Image (cartoon, rainbow, N blue to C red):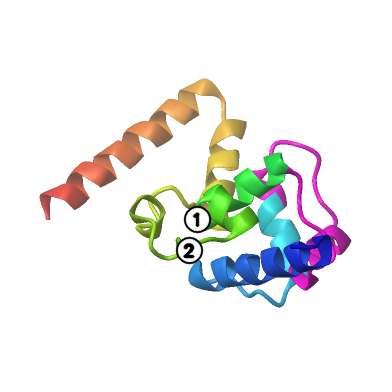
Amino acid sequence: MNSANERESFSERLQQALKNAHYSPDSPTRLAREFNIRFDGRPITVHAARKWLVGEAIPTQEKLRMIAHWLGVPAEWLRFGGAEDASTSTEHANGASRFESADVKLIADLQRLDEHHRQIAREFIRMLVRMNNQK
């Protein structure tokens, strides 16, 4: 497969994974924003996200692994395709490893608190989980 076809195929898989995770595959701005709040490295530009979506570029391996984790698909499938469909991975299809942007922002807010208030927030969340499990 030549490099242009590889980029186009990656773009199709990325768009499919975005749709399956209930994100629009038509918004490079949203892709860049969602990527950047999850990625510890250097942020990407909207232009880079657009290139991924239209098949002009493929992200680095580190970025690709983060995208796959975020969208709940195998990194190998996202990069190379293959027999495994994005929605058939039992580990990822349940969404347990995927966080919504509001969850990521909440974690960032939690990290900005002092230790005393972080502990209060943790205990409160644990209490809510226990109450929810009793239902």
Residue 44 appears left or right of 83: right
Point out the image quarter for the C terminus: bottom left
Which class describes the residues within 10 Å of circle 2: few (<14), some (14-19), or many (20+)?
many
Residue 86 - label = 2
Distance between the alpha carbons at the discs numbered 1 and 2: 5 Å
Q: Which residue is pictured at 77% across the width and 63% down the height?
A: 7
Task: Specify the segment rendered in magenta.
Answer: 36-60
The amino acid type found where label 2 is placed reads Ala
Q: Observer-nearest residue: 6 or 69?
A: 6
Q: Are marks 1 and 2 in contact (CB under 8 Å)?
A: yes
Point out the image quarter for the N terminus: bottom right
Give the residue at the far front of this rendering.
1
Q: In the displayed structure, would residue 110 be above or below residue 90?
A: above
Q: Which residue is pictured at 81% across the width and 39% down the height?
A: 42
Q: Observer-nearest residue: 109 or 97?
A: 97
Q: Which residue is pictured at 56% across the width and 49% down the height?
A: 75
Secondary structure beneath disc 2? loop
Q: In the displayed structure, would residue 104 be above or below residue 32?
A: above
Secondary structure beneath disc 1? loop
Residue 73 - label = 1
Residue 120 appears left or right of 19: left
Q: Residue 2: x, y in percent?
A: 80, 62
Residue 16 found in image quarter = bottom right
Residue 49 counted in the magenta span: yes
